[in-house]
Image: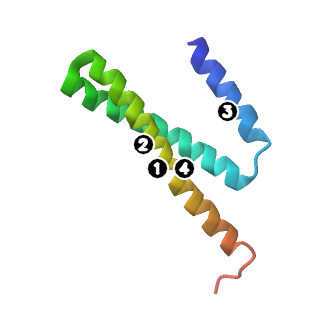
Amino acid sequence: MKAVFTLVVVVVFLTGCATQGDQARTEGTLAGAGIGAAVGAGLGYLIGGGQGAGIGAAVGAAVGGTSGYVYADQVAKRHEMLKGKNRM
């Protein structure tokens, strides 16, 4: 429980001073890693039991975190590109 609380505090401090694009990238990475770890752990457990769950969680977190960052980066770049343009 202390580790989760510490992680939340660190994330809050890191995103507090970040630009909007940086914050989106951080949140995308964390969300992707969390979802990837959960899915990877579930699949790993089905395939290889307890040890498979650990390996699946690690691989899922890496893939999910990378995917989340790439997606959030694309959205942030699109927002920057459209900033200041009028909609008709």
Q: Which residue is mark 2?
A: 63
Instruction: Give the mark toward the camera: 3 or 1.
Output: 1
| The label number, if any, that marks residue 30 in the structure image | none
Label 2 residue SS: helix
Q: What number is the disc on residue 11?
A: 3
**Regarding mark 3 in the picture, which secondary structure is present there?**
helix
* Residue that appears at 21% across and 22% down: 48
Query: Which residue is label 1 attached to?
Result: 67
Which disc is residue 69 wearing?
4
Left-right relation of 31 to 16: left
* Residue 58 rendering spot, x and y as whole percentages: 41, 29
Residue 27, position as x, y percentages in the image: 59, 43
Q: Position of residue 60 (x, y in %)?
A: 38, 36
Give the residue displayed 69% in from the left and 25% down from the top.
Answer: 9
Q: Are marks 4 and 2 in contact (CB under 8 Å)?
A: no
Residue lying at 33% horizontally and 33% vertically, measured from the top left: 40
Q: Answer yes or no: do the residues labelled 1 and 4 have beta carbons within 8 Å?
A: yes
Closest to the observer: 51 or 25?
A: 51
